[in-house]
Amino acid sequence: MPNMSPKKNEMPVQLPEERRHNFDEVALGYTEEQAINEADRCLQCKHKPCVKGCPVHINIPGFILAIKNQDYKKAYEILTASSSLPAVCGRVCPQESQCEALCVRGIKGESVGIGRLERFAADWYLKNAEEQVEKPEPNGHKVAIIGAGPAGLTCAGDLARLGYDVTIFEALHVAGGVLVYGIPEFRLPKKIVRKEIEVLQKLGVKLRTNMVIGQVLSIDELLEEGFEAIFIGSGAGLPRFMNIPGENASGVYSANEFLTRINLMKAYREESDTPIKHSRKLAVVGGGNVAMDAARCALRLGAEEVYIVYRRSEAEMPARLEEVHHAKEEGVIFKTLTNPVEILTNEQGHVSGMKCVEMELGEPDESGRRRPIAKPNSEFVLDVDTVVIAVGTSPNPLLRNTTEGLETNKYGCLIVNEEGLTSRDGVYAGGDAVTGAATVILAMGAGKTAAASMHKYIQEKRKKA
Ligand code: FAD
Ligand code: SF4
Ligand code: SF4
């Protein structure tokens, strides 16, 4: 008889008053006992509805059964048959709107903690088992990957396992994409990402950092150098702004810059070469995961007051529920139905406040969410000395501008067919560069699709030759 408790086993966490002063991981992970108990809540449904909610179709009941039987190695193997980054996805996947949203246990209570169990199995393996990596037989074909985020890393891994000579070209000095420069250490420890990248390197994947494709080398030059197919996984790292007065003032950051300085450059350490201003009162504009991450980082840097300023209500916030909950517990102040209209500056040109208006919700707009409308005569000034803008990002136009015939849509996203092929023969793409800012698991799924298509493309070309 399965465990019929309507509630998930709770995730052990660092206490809010402690964690708001450190960058250590907030969620501590299930103990073995909790994991087995949670695995026992799974009904092993014949039709596996949960699997339909997972973009990479992990055999969810299969890996959960292995955990229940205490065969954690098998659980890990089932996970990695579909996903190359289970320790990452178990932590950051929006499970509540994917696999867990379709779990039958969610009908009368809480769904099975699929993400938490995935994390448990992956962490167990990383701690207890030596990764056995067998270098595959080379197949004599060479491919290039642009960008070392989850899309590019997944594509690289799948092609390396098929024997391809894979080179990743990464613009930054480290691999990982948003996993290292965006998502903070307290949500995703970087050693986990490094471990996953080491596995790829053991498979023979070559990593060339500080290589901005479109500047140092063009896509056409890569093709001329003998790369037979190319995957573009360059993400969507170009910040959007609100275009309001004062946005160029000193003390205004894009969330990307703010988070990169903190996560990648370790700006919170005394010895950091890229220090960050220590704010007294800081406002983050936006309501997504990026905004929550920026606000929670600001608290950890010692700000006395941190606001989330969001023009819709909390119900419309795109951030994961867990992130909103954690941010509130840590003391972030939510100013919803509030829209900034001007950033005020002092004589030195530094932020001295943010003029806002109160909003109310009208009819739904084209996104299906209710349109925010400014309330008349509701202006007020929020007393802040730093503003972080987290209102979205788009793909950088560099590759499109330097590659003849590479088509993008009106948002600057690369256009691909269902196989991940762009408008250029042999050039594939996936992840945020195609969808705009989305999720880790969708980027990984796109990397997998493209790897399979690139393999087919090269095989067919070989047959014709
Ligand atoms: P990226 O991760 O952006 O990687 C692209 C890589 O390409 C980067 O390393 C970049 O330096 C490199 N690059 C760009 N241009 C070039 C070039 N010209 N030449 C060479 N290299 C280039 N998703 C979730 O699922 N859960 C979360 O909790 C979550 N939180 C997030 C928090 C933050 C702060 C941010 C910013 C995003 C978050 N996301 C989250 C979204 C998720 O991280 C992205 O959807 C995912 O990383 C996209 O993967 P990608 O490989 O397409 O691109
Ligand atoms: Fe769920 Fe994400 Fe794991 Fe798929 S990868 S099973 S969606 S947590
Ligand atoms: Fe288990 Fe829920 Fe999937 Fe059923 S839907 S197999 S209970 S995880």
Image (cartoon, rainbow, N blue to C red):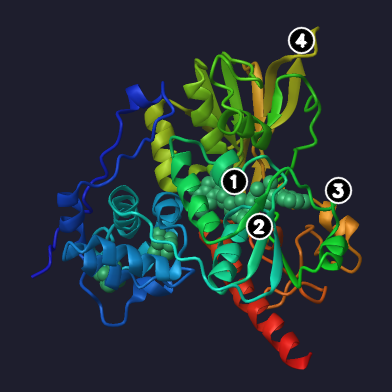
| Contact, mark 1 vs mark 2 (Cβ under 8 Å) | yes
Mark in front: 4 vs 2: 2
**Amino acid type of the residue that numbered disc 2 sits on in the rendered structure:** Asp
Would you say 408 lies left or right of 67 here? right
Residue tagged 2:
432
Up/down of 125 relative to 239, above or below: below
Q: Which mark is residue 215?
A: 3
Q: Disc 1 to disc 4, how far (Cα)?
A: 34 Å
Q: Disc 4 to disc 2, how far (Cα)?
A: 38 Å
Mark in front: 1 vs 2: 1
Give residue 260's position: percent from left, percent from top: 63, 34
Query: Does label 2 or label 3 sit earlier along the sequence?
Result: 3
Query: Does label 4 or label 2 sit earlier along the sequence?
Result: 4
Residue tagged 1:
178
Q: Is mark 2 within 8 Å of ligand 1?
A: yes
Q: Is mark 3 within 8 Å of ligand 1?
A: yes
Mark 4, other Cα within 10 Å: few <14 / some 14–19 / many ≥20: few
Query: Does label 3 or label 1 sit earlier along the sequence?
Result: 1
**Amino acid type of the residue that numbered disc 4 sits on in the rendered structure:** Asn
Q: Is disc 2 placed on a helix, strand or loop?
A: helix
Mark 2, other Cα within 10 Å: few <14 / some 14–19 / many ≥20: many
Mark in front: 1 vs 4: 1
Is residue 283 in sight in this rendering? yes
